[in-house]
Amino acid sequence: MQTPCIHVCSMVPATGFCGGCGRTLQEIGGWMNYTDAERRGIMAQLPARLATAAATSRTKTSLAEPPGRPS
């Protein structure tokens, strides 16, 4: 089974997931040692994790942006 890595490695501190693949650092480091069944289990969780990581990143970004200037 191939890795879900898309070479966009950026950990989202609030979730502990990579914003590119959705895995934790422990999962990334141990990927080659997992069985196919373990990998499939992790892969099944990735879409939800990526959605959570993306939502968390968007929220933090929108909170960090300065308010717009009045016209």
Image (cartoon, rainbow, N blue to C red):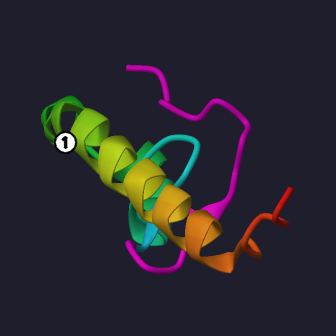
Query: Farthest top residue?
Result: 1
**Res. 37 image quadrant:** top left
Q: Residue at image x 22%, y 42%?
A: 48
**Residue at the location (40% across, 53% down)?**
55
Q: Is residue 26 left or right of residue 7?
A: left
x%, y% of residue 1? 37, 20
Of residues 58 and 33, the one drawn nearer to the viewer in this rendering: 58
Residue 55 located left or right of residue 11: left
Mark 1 belongs to which amino acid?
Answer: Gln
Residue found at x 63% / y 66%: 61
* Vertical comparison of 34 with 60: above or below: above
Residue 34 in magenta stretch: no
Query: Which stretch is magenta?
Result: 1-15
Does the rendering let one see residue 13?
yes
Report the residue at 59% width, 65% height from top: 62
Residue 29 visible within the image: no
How many labels, in total?
Answer: 1
Nearest the viewer among 17 and 57 is 57
Q: Which residue is mark 1?
A: 45
* Image quarter hosting the C terminus: bottom right
Is residue 11 found inside the magenta-colored segment of the image? yes
Give the class, few, some or many, for how many residues have Cα within 10 Å of label 1's Cα (few <14, many ≥20): few
Element on which disc 1 rests: helix
The furthest residue to the front: 71
Along the line of sight, the residue nearer the viewer: 45 or 67: 67
Q: Nearer the viewer, residue 9 or 1?
A: 9
Q: Main secondary structure of the magenta part?
A: loop
* Residue 28 % position (x, y): 50, 56
Residue 8 found in image quarter: top right
x, y percent for residue 27: 39, 59
